[in-house]
Image (tube, coloured by chain):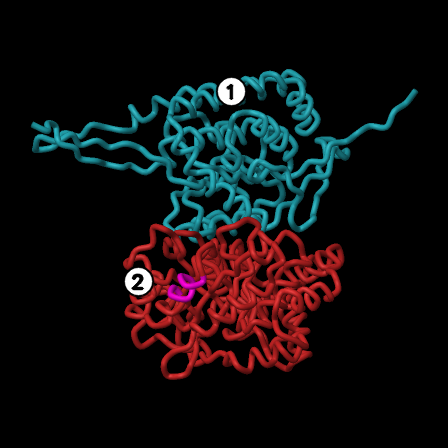
Amino acid sequence: MTGTTLVTARERALAVLGGDPDDATLRRYLHGIPGVDAVGLEQRAAALGTRSVKTSSKAWALDRIISLIDLTTLEGADTPGKVRSLVAKAQNPDPADPATPRVAAVCVYGDMVPYAVEALGAAHGDPDDGGISVAAVATAFPSGRSSLDIKLADTAEAVAAGADEIDMVIDRGAFLAGRYGLVFDQIAAVKDACRRPDGTSASLKVILETGELVTYDNVRRASWLSILAGGDFIKTSTGKVQPAATLPVTLLMLEVVRDWHRLTGHKVGVKPAGGIRTSKDAIKYLVTVAETVGEEWLVPHLFRFGASSLLNDVLLQRQKLASGHYSGADYVTID
Amino acid sequence: MSRLTVPKTYKLFIGGAFPRSESGRTYEVTSASGGFLANAAKASRKDARDAVVAARGAVAGWAGATAYNRGQVLYRIAELLEGRRAQFVAEIEEAEGVSRAAAGAQVDEAIDRWVWYAGWADKFAQVAGNANPVAGPYFNLSVPEPTGVVAIVAPQDSALLGLVSAVAPALVAGNAVVVVASERFPLSAISLAEVLATSDVPKGVVNVLTGSPAEIAPWLASHADVNALDLVGAGALDWIDLEIAAADTLKRVHRPEQGADAAAPSLERIVGFTETKTVWHTKSLR
């Protein structure tokens, strides 16, 4: 997957901001964005979550959810063996049903990228072409508390090892302290570190960690900031902080993506991550995407679920639809 | 001065909570003479699904508790039942149309069965298990372990005693239970659920559904996450079909029983929903 190059992203940002992306300019711009109507947002999200989905649509939705999943393992206890079994599951989620689609990507820590790449072998590729990407979390995930040099080295190492996508965390401390210019520069620098020698670039997902941003206004500002700085995706959470992804927060980020698309014609992806465990929840997200930015966003390069246990629940629902009776945890793999 | 009565809303008992049916349906429960008693929740297949999820989540904790502890918890249910004896007697009298003495006898018998089964909790393994003689210097031990999630169609012609006779033995070994109560007499089942909710039984260990067994039982019989099926009260249903559906996922099945002796207390009802685990261990580590 090739992201937009830094030059055009920066030019676009300059054009939108009307000046250099320093603290003052960004502050003027981000604080000029209207505040979020929290009650209205939550009501809208709740309303989108009550849609009745008929059986045929549900079958479509379940398959689409699988093809949008970033199958994730981000534990201190990750081993090469665990990554290999994760990759096996990504390629063949339900061994009893070969028609089950593959997931979009596997998401691992940077040092596990070589094992994921090796295990994927020929299946490694762009999910839009039927392959499975390797996504790596970088930049001192999950806290983001380290120097820029370390963050850049972290990123470059993962890209060199074969990562197609980099999930970076923003410096929430700097953001909350109002140092928007610093956050902007760090995202832009990490984006630069995503480049490969051949001129292509790994896709950059910017994790806002909405659970630490406290307010919807901050989420909206951080979303704009990340997109201005060149993020290809904005992602809700690391999954290590509660609350992680919620429907209102994802709706809010989708609205920013929609507004950015109207403003510039450029499409940015959204990835809710953490806390989405059931098919029912995931379908609510699909409805929200389709109703906010449109169905063309329901493709792997514009929308992802960051999840681990979600896949098993979707497989159970698929089995229920296929067999007509309820399935159980004994009929899917233990993660 | 007259006052308005405050009738009770009878709901389901799933995962330690009392939800209404997901479907929003209720049905009228009438007394033996045909008078209106209450509206009971009419559980749907999705309520059954939720109940199985709750039961599955409760198995590890309940099966992992010591047998002695399970016995104490079950005995405590009998204690609490004794305290609410008058309520159950009145309910049964009204619902079944029997005399106060007969209703009282049924409640007493139900309480006594809890006590009887509670006593078995830390004893049945001695009877059902064994130290097997083997041709070598090894201990070879067979011990009964709980099957897991047991779905029960409770006896349909009794308000309390049938339900207790089916549920209690399944709990003794450490199974979690999803029980479909008597369709005609569901109110005592929910009152019993209130007793369970305020006793020390962990949430999800017993889940009570009211409604039509004919509608719910097929979903439980074919559910892949249910390990055993007690059809004791399913005599009026197409229980052969249920048995066939259960065979697809290799469930243990108890067949329907009729008459006054249905689900009579027996060790067999406890052992029926256990699996035998056999382990070898060296006799000496010299």
Position above or below: B111 against B225: above
- Residue A84 is tagged as 2
Label 2 to label 1: alpha-carbon separation: 50 Å
Determine if residue A45 is in view. Answer: yes
The amino acid type found where label 1 is placed reads Arg
> Element at badge 1?
helix
Q: Is residue B248 visible?
A: no
Q: Is residue A58 left or right of residue A308?
A: right
Q: Residues within 10 Å of mark 1 (few under 14, many from 20)?
A: many
Residue A307 position in % (x across, y down): 47, 59
Q: In this picture, is A42 found above or below B271? A: below
Residue A49 image-quadrant placement? bottom right
Q: Quadrant of the C terminus of chain A?
A: bottom left
Q: Amino acid at mark 2?
A: Arg
**Bounds of the magenta segment:** A148-154
Q: SS of the residue at dot 2?
A: helix
Task: Name the magenta segment's main secondary structure.
Answer: helix
**Residue A118 highlighted magenta (yes or no):** no
Which chain is in cyan here? B
User: Who's the residue at 14% across and 29% down the image?
Assistant: B133
- In which chain is the residue bearing label 2? A
Coordinates of residue A29 in the picture (x, y in percent)? 69, 68
Q: Nearer the viewer, residue B170 or A85?
A: A85
**Residue A216 at x, y = what percent?**
67, 57
Q: Which chain is red?
A: A
Q: Which residue lies under the disc numbered 1?
A: B76
User: How crowded is the residue under tag 2: few (<14 C-alpha within 10 Å), some, or many (20+)?
Assistant: some
Q: Position of residue B210 (x, y in %)?
A: 62, 40
| Residue found farthest to the right | B1
Badge number at residue A225: none
The chain to which mark 1 is attached is B
